[in-house]
Amino acid sequence: LIRGQYEKLLTGLAGMVAGTVFAVSISSWFFGGPGIWIEWFHGLMNLMSGEFVPSQGNFKAVYFAGLDLSTKGQAVLALMFCALTLGTLWWGRKRDTLNRGVGQRPDEQRGLIEYAQLYAMGCLIQMFVSSLVWLHYYVLVIPMLLVAFRPWSEPAARGTGSIVLHRILPLLALLLVLDGPVGRLFASDPAASSNLANTFAASILFLLGLWQLRFQDARVRGYS
């Protein structure tokens, strides 16, 4: 929407609808009818109504924030994260337009990076607002790690700041996700250790994502 690619947006939405209809149809036929999806939905609601704590494998980020969100609260929080992300994207593109000059088209390579960033940010937002996050869900930090570690031809920060923002913080997030380096700090409570490490890693990556959307590299070389 921000880039004005309405045809691409409609094509993508149509593809998602078609894929959903196909998947539901095939699975309904395989399992003997569409009623299987009604059973699945009731089972999901029963699962979500349970209170899973970190010691039972729930690595939700809102646990450490002390939030007990209803479904409506989760939706509001998700919209707030999305608004923050899109607002930062708009801010960064406005800055880029002013620096580049009115009438000049943005670099297409930048557009590809923005798509990757927004995909990665969406994965992080999913983990931030969900009331149930199993440990393997943190595979969703990988897209943002790839974006954060990308090569920069013109870093927005230079010197020590560049090293910290472009390499040290992404590396710290990676080490936290691997969990081993911080596990000894909370040896008496391994579940709390893993939960804290993964939540902190996702938070670092989200803040890096916002920073990189704000200070985008408009002339990236060697990135594909």
Image (tube, helix red, strand yellow):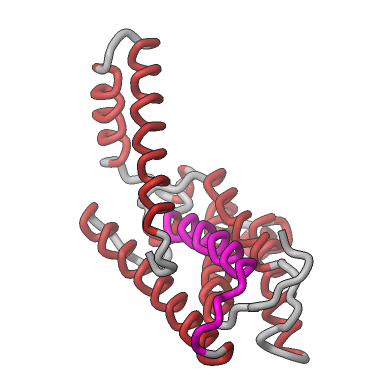
User: In the image, what residue occupies the spot 66% across and 68% down?
Assistant: 148
User: In the image, what residue occupies the spot 49% across and 80% down?
Assistant: 93
* Quarter location, residue 78: bottom left
Q: Is residue 60 visible?
A: yes
* Place of residue 18 in the rendered image (x, y in percent of width and height, measured from the top left): 37, 32
7 and 162: which is toward the camera: 7
* Place of residue 177 in the rendered image (x, y in percent of width and height, measured from the top left): 64, 57
In this rendering, position of residue 15 left or right of residue 108: left
Position above or below: 31 against 13: above
Q: Is residue 7 magenta?
A: no
Position above or below: 84 against 36: below
Q: Is residue 63 visible?
A: no
In this rendering, position of residue 7 left or right of residue 36: right
Q: Is residue 119 magenta?
A: yes
Majority secondary structure in the magenta region: helix
In this rendering, position of residue 92 left or right of residue 10: right
